[in-house]
Image (cartoon, rainbow, N blue to C red):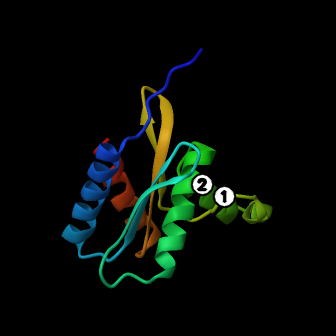
């Protein structure tokens, strides 16, 4: 039998707060989503002024990072590198800004951010992930 850590509501609150702090420090209006290791939503926060579509995109970035067990930037690089067919992969988005959350080497969830430039989304997501 295997054992693994799971993200609780206290961790979700901490992740969202750390990501929000980074976004606000940069004056970026973003949406932040946190999911479990199966890609199921645990928390979402859309900052004032952020486009409604970003809520959907942030959740998909988080889901893709959780299910794929890697940053969504890696998928974007594959597509940009010529593997165009990858955009049709089911349940995965190839947009930078999704970061898996690891505890003891195991993915326990992910955080996704949308609303600004791809590398800025990733910066906010990584700041949130660092709070874990």
Give the percent coordinates (x, y) of residue 109: 48, 44
**Foreground of the two, 115 or 33:** 33
Tell me whether circle 1 and circle 2 mark residues in contact (CB < 8 Å). yes
Give the percent coordinates (x, y) of residue 120: 38, 67
**Residue name at image x 37 percent, y 41 percent:** 8
For mark 1, does the 10 Å Cα neighbourhood hold few (<14), some (14 to 19), or many (20 or more) residues? Answer: many
Q: Is residue 3 visible?
A: yes
Identify residue for label 1.
92
In this view, 20 is above or below 104: below
In this view, 66 is above or below 93: above
Quarter where residue 5 is shown: top left
SS under mark 2 = helix
Label whose residue precedes the other's in the sequence (1 or 2): 2
Q: Is residue 130 visible?
A: no
Q: Which mark is residue 64?
A: 2
SS under mark 1 = loop
Left or right: residue 36 versus residue 15 is: right
**Residue name at image x 25 percent, y 57 percent:** 17
């Amino acid at each position: 039998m295997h054992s693994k850590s799971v993200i609780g509501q206290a961790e979700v609150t901490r992740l969202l707060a750390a990501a929000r702090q980074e976004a606000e420090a940069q004056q970026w209006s973003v949406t932040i989503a946190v999911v479990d290791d199966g890609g199921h939503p645990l928390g979402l926060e859309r900052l004032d002024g952020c486009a409604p579509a970003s809520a959907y995109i942030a959740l998909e970035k988080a889901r893709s990072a959780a299910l794929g067990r890697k940053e969504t930037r890696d998928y974007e690089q594959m597509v940009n590198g010529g593997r165009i067919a990858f955009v049709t992969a089911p349940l995965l988005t190839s947009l930078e800004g999704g970061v898996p959350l690891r505890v003891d080497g195991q993915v326990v969830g992910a955080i996704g951010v949308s609303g600004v430039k791809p590398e800025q989304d990733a910066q906010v997501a990584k700041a949130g992930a660092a709070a874990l």
